[in-house]
Image: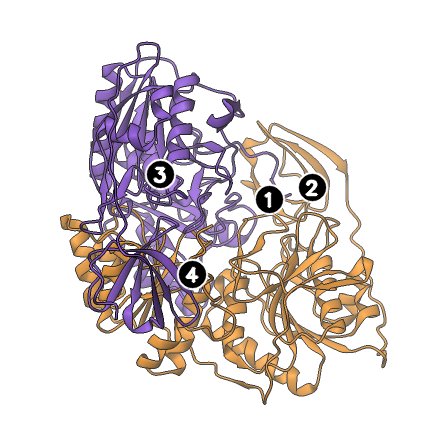
Chain colours: A orange, B purple
Amino acid sequence: MVKKFKGLEKIEVELKDEVYKGIVMPNSDSETLFLKLESGYNVGINIKDIKKVKILDKKIDIKSSTVKVKHNKNLPTVSILHTGGTIASKVDYNTGGVVARFEPEELVSMFPELEKIANIKSIFVSNVFSENLRFKDYVNISKAIEKEIKSGVKGIIIGHGTDTMHYSAAALSFMFDNLPVPVVLVGSQRSSDRGSSDAALNLINATYFIANTEFTGVAICMHKDINDDTCLIMPALKTRKLHSSRRDAFKIINDEAIAEVNYSKNKIKMIKELKNEKGAWKSKNKFEEKVGILRTYPNLNSKQIESFKGYKGLVIEGTGLGHISIDNSPENKKIFNALKKLSKSCVIVMTSQCIFGRVNMNVYSTGRELQKIGVISGEDMTTETAYIKLAWLLGNYKKDQVKQMISTNLKGEINKRIGLEFI
Amino acid sequence: MVKKFKGLEKIEVELKDEVYKGIVMPNSDSETLFLKLESGYNVGINIKDIKKVKILDKKIDIKSSTVKVKHNKNLPTVSILHTGGTIASKVDYNTGGVVARFEPEELVSMFPELEKIANIKSIFVSNVFSENLRFKDYVNISKAIEKEIKSGVKGIIIGHGTDTMHYSAAALSFMFDNLPVPVVLVGSQRSSDRGSSDAALNLINATYFIANTEFTGVAICMHKDINDDTCLIMPALKTRKLHSSRRDAFKIINDEAIAEVNYSKNKIKMIKELKNEKGAWKSKNKFEEKVGILRTYPNLNSKQIESFKGYKGLVIEGTGLGHISIDNSPENKKIFNALKKLSKSCVIVMTSQCIFGRVNMNVYSTGRELQKIGVISGEDMTTETAYIKLAWLLGNYKKDQVKQMISTNLKGEINKRIGLEFI
């Protein structure tokens, strides 16, 4: 029944509990039908689950048009660096895959507002799903940023997959000192060829913010809420993806927004006081590879700790105020001993799987025992920021310096403790 | 300057950026001063950081009084099982440690409202910080619950540390079929001898809910917000600690509350339709020990996956819709191969470190590749619930059954997908 589709048909598919409406992608195989949904998402449907199919349109006409972009000397220039992900991509209906659109002309034809805000430079860095990025990719992105800074642009947008955008934002924050321009990471939760995509709003608002403020440094620009009008400029080191699919998936953790931006109303509301760094910019871009994250859980086995043997750094994502099971029960005792052994050669930092709030290892005996064997409080850093910071510190500083710097605020990653914050 | 304190003095301590007011605990040593703060928390202050000390009261008089409790035949009986944690504990000012108060008389003298709501039975199970609990402790708690069910009480409260309360709540949910009584886990973020403690409100509202509704099954009762009046009765399998210190730290994930309870206004608002299970109750209480959680991150090393060699179950807390780095770069390729090897003998389940939202492994090729090697979607389960469920399933069912049951809703842990939920 389904095999007869060649692709590009608009259909309605009825399953047991669901109905999907979308365009058949040409790479559907004999077991799976791939549909491009109106929401912008692709979905793979097991053909044997299909109860009924209705054809809505025999073949969708995919038009592609480009416009001629002229340089406007009254507008600033903004570089868009493409690293991959859903932003600024279109489905290639011939292969069913998502293809990147990198020419300024194509970007402007997709997002015509851009031309009114800035002169757009469009630069290919990579085309990688963000879950596949590694430290070496952060270095590549930083080199592309350096090139753009030298070319004298007003600011830089990094188009990035949302899965690990907050890790990359943290990496870029630590790598640059005295960054003279804004570097704003932008992602989207829906591919940009569909009406419901969030790509346009995020990209346009980021460009508008860069063109019209004096902000410098690294930030993330994503939807404020599920209304398609306002974006938040979020602090790169205090932000996290907190929903797997919503357009407002990114949330600020233990901090506040830098600004709210609404291009359609020509409104930028600055929230945080700008503390732009002064002095000549420079970058330190080494990362220690032997750094990891251990998320604790009840019934943890000491083998998981031993798997980090030879590591230079470890972030433990503990429970509550920063705990891991280390009492005198035989298995927990093993965990304590494994940690004690590891801590002799490895910088161990504690964060909390509570996500919000602060680690405080002085309240309970568990925390105090951990401090005695050298575990360092991650304060109110997110696990992601602590991990990237630790790898970056170990790549660029000596161990003693790292131990001191990890719980010291360098770039806004640690807020000052206000009382005990026990609201 | 600090050494002269014997304990029980009320003092004000000035540090560089902070001022603390509290009672000196007698176990303060020559390096650290332990203060019991008015918030109910203890804090350890490094003596060399102290700038100034002011004595507010030379010795606080710690009074202890107990009342005589009479059985009221018009009220139901509620059992409070004490497992440990901050709830129903007082600071022992002689040692500075927190001691548990287990006699009904002492509970009622601490929380006099209890006597008006129910006859209280108070039972000691253990005195363990919840971060130290292991699967064997879940079995002990379940046996104590069985005993109380047989004794014919109206309901059971589990006093529990907050760090891993949601893991224990999940364990108890799966262990019992057709639970004939309510089992409500209650914790507190402040010890119960201080005015600002949340112990009283949580315990009183839980007792009031048990005494006055027909709810059966497992739930969590904690503050709705930072106002000290209303608690939420939260679904045991869809709740998580989401702040390290706030009283309203527990949040419902991908679901809604069972009820809102405000004892001071005699108000219970039922929110969720009750689906009480019928039939004879029974319990299955085995857990497979060789089950773990792997939280993914950029630059993950395949060794972390290999550390689960010989495991029967693994929950991967992936990124976004359920991803892990498995593209063709050499290091990521190693991760894919390690996963492929492990999946031959181990049931691997995917959850999302986004916390909120649903895993969907049909949208991107990464998810589809993972499904091909046998990784199973955890749907909208929290990582904690998926982990406990997997360990419990592997303890009680055959591997083929486990693979089918893990992504099937058994006890409310998986909500039906509504469309694609891409708000």
Neighbourhood count class around disc 3 (C-alpha, 10 Å): few under 14, some 14–19, many 20 upward: many
Q: Are marks 2 and 1 in contact (CB under 8 Å)?
A: yes
Point out the frontmost of discs 2 and 3. 3
- Quadrant housing the N terminus of chain A: top right
Element at label 3: loop
Residue drawn at 24 percent across, 21 percent down: B148
Element at label 4: helix
Point out the frontmost of discs 1 and 4. 4
Q: Which callout, 4 or 2, points at the residue further toward the start of the chain?
A: 2
Q: Residue furthest bottom?
A: A280
Observer-nearest of B272 and B203? B203
Mark 3, residue position: B187
Q: Is residue A313 left or right of residue A28?
A: left
Residue A310, image x, y percentages: 25, 71
Point out the frontmost of discs 3 and 4. 3
Q: Amino acid at mark 1?
A: Val
Observer-nearest of A168 and A81? A168
Residue drawn at 38 percent across, 51 percent down: B38
Labelled disc at residue A43: 1
Residue A366, image x, y percentages: 25, 55
Q: Amino acid at mark 3?
A: Gly
Neighbourhood count class around disc 4 (C-alpha, 10 Å): few under 14, some 14–19, many 20 upward: many
Q: Which callout, 2 or 1, points at the residue further toward the start of the chain?
A: 2
Q: CA distance from mark 3 to mark 4?
A: 25 Å
Mark 2, residue position: A22
